Amino acid sequence: MIYSAGCEYAIRAVMKLAAMVPPGQFMLLRDLVESEGMPAHFVGKVLQTLARAEVLVSAKGRGGGFALARPPAEITLRQIVEAIDGPARIGRCILGFAQCDDAQPCPQHDDWVEIRRHIYDLLDNTTVADLLKAMARKQRSGARATARPG
């Protein structure tokens, strides 16, 4: 995958919070990681990073935990990815060359520039709300596909 493990956990956590936590309420880290089967210590650091990036808010004490900082329709995948992996992860050479640019391209440079543009478009134009809608559609179509007649 083009994302780090931390970024994958971040996307899953944000989707879970968007789906399960009503506005004004919080989910405990423990409840989040147990429901998703994620490592608590690592995901705690990831969520704190998302809070610093203003994707999430966190609250300590009774009734505290994590919640979205904005409605799901206002949080893009790019905001999550760049908060965790930074902008350079997708921007670097696909073959791993230290020097790869228009002046000194690697063998895959031109193809990767085009693919990268599409990835950025996808990340910029996909919100957490879009992901939740797509997931619900897939679950409904999967349920219909496995339903047995009478």
Image (cartoon, rainbow, N blue to C red):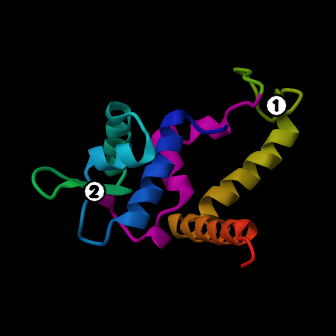
Give residue 44's mark: none
User: The magenta stretch spans which residues?
Assistant: 66-94
Task: Provide the residue designation for mark 1.
Answer: 103
The residue positioned farthest toward the left in the image shown: 62
Task: Pinpoint residue 137: horizontal percent, then vertical percent.
Answer: 65, 71
Task: Locate the C terminus by quadrant.
Answer: bottom right
Q: Residue at x 32, y 31 (%)?
A: 41
Extreme-top residue of the structure: 98
Q: Is residue 132 magenta?
A: no
Q: Position of residue 142 (x, y in %)?
A: 69, 65
- Figure quadrant of the N terminus: top right
Q: Amino acid at mark 2?
A: Met
Q: How far across and how far down the image is residue 84, in percent?
A: 46, 41
| Left or right relative to 19: residue 134 | right
Is 92 situated above or below 27?
above
Residue identifier under label 2? 27
Left or right side of 53 for 94 = right
Sequence order check: which comes first, mark 1 or mark 2? 2
Vertical relation: 117 (above or below) 40: below
Q: Can you tell which quarter of the image residue 26 is in?
A: bottom left
For the residues marked 1 and 2, what is the alpha-carbon distance in whole angstroms?
49 Å
Q: Amino acid at mark 1?
A: Ala
Q: Using the image as rendered, state which of residue 97 and residue 132 is in the foreground.
A: 132
